[in-house]
Amino acid sequence: MQAPSQFRATLTPHRSLSAQGFLIVMAAVGIVSFVAGMAFLLIGAWPVFGFFGLDVALVYFAFRANYRAARQFETVEVTPDLVTLTHVDAKGRTIAHTFNPYWVRVEIEEWKDGRAFLKLAEKGRQTLFGSFLLDEEKHELAAAIRAALVTARGGPRI
């Protein structure tokens, strides 16, 4: 039997545009493209009308691809027995990495250009995670996981 979870976090990419917002944006793009296309059609440049329709289709498919990519998520779970990092991609494929809570380290690698990479490291192997988080969120998550590791290892309970 596995020990109860000391810490569990589910990480998901942020998407600021809701489904209703998507409909509003697509309606606005469609209306503007239709009106502009009609103007070109009326002056005799009928091929331009088709290109405006193509623009609307490309914007639609770009948004759909973005929403499809947003289905990915990652879960970090810390118990006294195990640290589990699970990646689920947009297609539902799952990859789980397990670590010993006594040996695993939470590291943040900061590059000169300002990017930060969050990883779990143990005995020469490293696993990156949370790539879609903001740098501030990565630092907060690292602190929370470190605190959970202290508790899981039998350290002070605050």
Image (cartoon, rainbow, N blue to C red):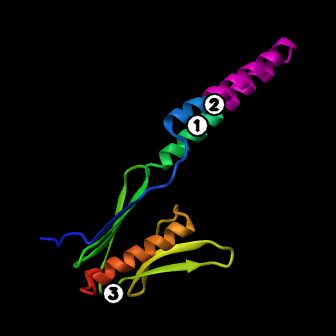
Residue pointed to by mark 2 = 57
Question: In the picture provided, is 45 more to the left or to the right than 70?
Answer: right
User: Residue at (72%, 25%) from the top-left corner?
Assistant: 32
Q: Where is residue 50 in the image (x, y as percent from the top left)?
A: 73, 22
Q: Where is residue 53 in the image (x, y as percent from the top left)?
A: 69, 25
Q: In which quarter of the image is residue 56?
A: top right
Determine whether 37 is above or below 124 in the image. Answer: above
Q: Are marks 3 and 1 in contact (CB under 8 Å)?
A: no
Dot 1, crowdedness within 10 Å: few (<14), some or many (≥20)?
few
The residue nearer to you, when weighing 2 against 96, is 2
Q: What residue type is labelled 2?
A: Ala
Q: Are marks 2 and 1 in contact (CB under 8 Å)?
A: yes
Give the numbered dot on residue 103: 3
Within the magenta stretch, is there residue 54?
Answer: yes
Pick whichever of labels 3 and 1 is earlier in the sequence: 1
| Magenta stretch bounds | 27-56
User: Residue at (32%, 77%) from the top-left corner?
Assistant: 148
Quick one: which residue is furthest to the left in this view?
A: 1
Q: Which amino acid does label 3 sit on?
A: Trp
Element on which disc 2 rests: helix
Within the magenta stretch, is there residue 23?
Answer: no
The residue nearer to you, when weighing 7 against 96, is 7
